[in-house]
């Protein structure tokens, strides 16, 4: 998150608003390449969890999945070439010829990185299944920091958008190589290639197919708007819209960091026959931790978001604040309960969830076009926010009827104490923020006060004993890390 906050103003100032918009369009195209693992990765993860103690079965399954994924990587290359060919027909009306040439080059480079990433996805699934989260997250953080520093240096020298995409692609490939080296040396896994059998493919793809459909829906929700705006209006509005929705990534990072760690435990409990009461309690426990983290971020963005955007990127991006609110408020509800997706997968109900989400995403396309032509980027954001909210409540009905989760109890227990406190703090914050002087110092001071009051209020009036213990554990680890860092220094 820090790297992105640091890099975005540098990219905007170096590339310009139109250039940054073009860069965002490439990112949107890349999202459709990354989903070409067809959701099989979650199916692979479940197999590894189920056979975590049988190394021979694990290694054999990994060999067969690597062979399958290598074929999928080849498919990514073919789709990339197709995207390059479609750049002129789709964007010819709104982009200049030189912009289209640059766009085609960036898509091609991104496609190579996506192909390598998809081909070795089973290694990431194995590392997640064996709960090597510290290694995985440390690798991602290190790669992000190093690639950002390299990008800044090359931008200062005078390189442009193609270089930025090249560095990002190289970073992905290096991460794949490091993950491969880790599995070979630290986990003693035998990496080889072996063709999977037809029955095994049926099992894997049967589990993965609804996940793939859901991935398509997510890509439509969060990436297609950038392409529609670029094709219908131009690249400058894409930049404004993209900055507004970029905060989704930050909230999703906090949310998935929690649910991802809990994924193996959720799978074990469902496979062990946990009933609806136990699953409702598990959902509440995970969602409350997510809600405590996400409410702080969302509340801070509501209170200080417009001031931050103006300081961060300039007054030209003030409109991004309303884009952010339109999509982020409903999306936060989804993120607070995303552990439900794992339950639906293991229960064999993910098809239902995927079909609901895909239907809402499909409806979002014409609605976005209508509202985009009427209200501009705010209309596109409003369309997405509305359909995300409808999707959330429809899936809640699915959980109630087919899994038996007590959704009323879930909402009451998840929001207990948290909702009234964050509502009061946001109201007071919006009143007080108007009296803050300008500049970064006043902004930082306001955010610190808001954060301290939030933590104290939540700890005193909302958090359970379990949640306060987690907070103390987190603070203790941060303290140890700080002391160790000072000692090393």
Image: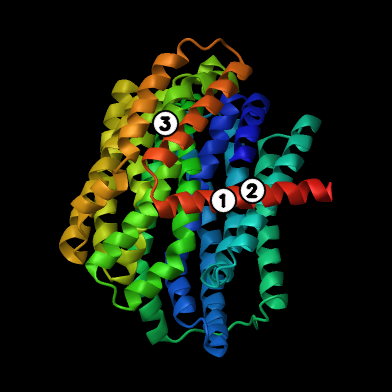
- Residue that mark 2 sits on: 478
**Which residue lies at the image location 58% right of the left edge and 62% below the top edge?**
133
- Other residues around mark 3 within 10 Å, as few (<14) / some (14–19) / many (≥20): many
Q: Earlier in the sequence, mark 1 or mark 3?
A: 3
Q: Percent position (x, y) of residue 244?
A: 46, 30
- What whole-number distance in Å separates the C-alpha atoms at marks 2 and 3? 24 Å
Q: Quadrant of residue 367?
A: top left
- Up the image or down, 161 lies above or below 54; here it is above
- Up the image or down, 397 lies above or below 242; here it is below
Q: Percent position (x, y) of residue 204?
A: 40, 76
Q: Are marks 1 and 2 in contact (CB under 8 Å)?
A: yes
Q: Tell me the SS state at disc 2.
A: helix
What is the total number of numbered labels drawn onto the structure image? Answer: 3
Judging depth in this view, the residue of 373 and 336 nearest the camera is 336
- Up the image or down, 481 lies above or below 88; here it is below
Q: Tell me the SS state at disc 1.
A: helix
**Which residue lies at the image location 48% right of the left edge and 19% below the top edge?**
318
- Residue that mark 3 sits on: 299
Asked whether residue 431 appears in the rendered view, the answer is: yes
- What whole-number distance in Å separates the C-alpha atoms at marks 1 and 3? 21 Å
- Up the image or down, 378 lies above or below 250; here it is above
- Residue that mark 1 sits on: 474
Residue 123 relative to residue 282: left or right: right
């Amino acid at each position: 998150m820090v790297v992105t906050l640091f890099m975005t103003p540098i990219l905007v100032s170096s590339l310009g608003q139109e250039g940054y918009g073009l860069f965002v369009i490439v990112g949107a195209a890349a999202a459709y390449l990354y989903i070409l693992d067809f959701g099989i990765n979650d199916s692979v993860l479940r197999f590894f969890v189920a056979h975590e103690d049988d190394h021979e079965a694990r290694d054999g399954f990994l060999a067969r999945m690597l062979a399958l994924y290598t074929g999928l990587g080849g498919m990514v290359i073919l789709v990339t070439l197709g995207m390059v060919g479609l750049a002129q027909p789709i964007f010819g009306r709104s982009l200049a010829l030189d912009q289209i040439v640059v766009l085609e080059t960036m898509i091609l480079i991104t496609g190579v990185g996506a192909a390598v990433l998809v081909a070795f996805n089973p290694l990431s699934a194995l590392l997640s299944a064996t709960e090597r989260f510290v290694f995985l997250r440390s690798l991602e953080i290190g790669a992000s920091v190093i690639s950002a520093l390299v990008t800044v240096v090359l931008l200062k020298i005078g390189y442009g958008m193609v270089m930025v995409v090249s560095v990002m692609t190289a970073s992905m490939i290096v991460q794949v190589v490091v993950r491969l080296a880790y599995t070979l040396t630290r986990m003693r896994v035998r990496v080889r290639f072996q063709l999977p059998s037809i029955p095994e493919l049926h099992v894997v793809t049967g589990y993965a197919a609804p996940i793939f459909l859901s991935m398509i829906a997510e890509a439509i929700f969060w990436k297609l708007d950038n392409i529609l705006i670029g094709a219908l209006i131009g690249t400058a509005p894409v930049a404004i819209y993209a900055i507004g929705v970029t905060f989704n990534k930050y909230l999703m990072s906090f949310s998935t960091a929690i649910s991802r760690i809990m994924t193996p435990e959720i799978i074990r409990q469902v496979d062990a026959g946990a009933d609806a009461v136990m699953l409702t309690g598990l959902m509440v426990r995970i969602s409350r931790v997510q809600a405590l983290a996400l409410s702080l971020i969302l509340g801070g963005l509501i209170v200080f978001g417009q001031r931050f955007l103006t300081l961060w990127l300039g007054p030209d991006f003030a409109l991004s604040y309303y884009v952010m609110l339109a999509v982020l408020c409903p999306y936060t509800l989804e993120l607070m309960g995303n552990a439900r997706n794992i339950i639906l997968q293991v229960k064999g109900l993910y098809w239902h969830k995927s079909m609901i989400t895909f239907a809402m995403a499909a409806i979002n396309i014409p609605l976005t076009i209508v509202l985009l032509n009427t209200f501009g980027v705010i209309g596109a954001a409003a369309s997405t926010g509305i359909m995300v909210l409808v999707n959330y409540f429809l899936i809640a009905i699915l959980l109630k009827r087919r899994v038996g989760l007590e959704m009323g109890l879930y909402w009451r227990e998840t929001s207990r104490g948290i909702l009234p406190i964050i509502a009061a703090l946001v109201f007071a914050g919006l009143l007080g923020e108007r009296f803050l002087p300008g500049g970064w110092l006043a902004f930082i001071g306001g955010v610190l006060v808001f954060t301290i009051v939030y933590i104290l209020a939540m700890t005193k009036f909302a958090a359970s004993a379990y949640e306060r213990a987690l907070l103390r554990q987190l603070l203790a680890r941060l303290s140890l890390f700080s002391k160790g860092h000072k000692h090393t220094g």
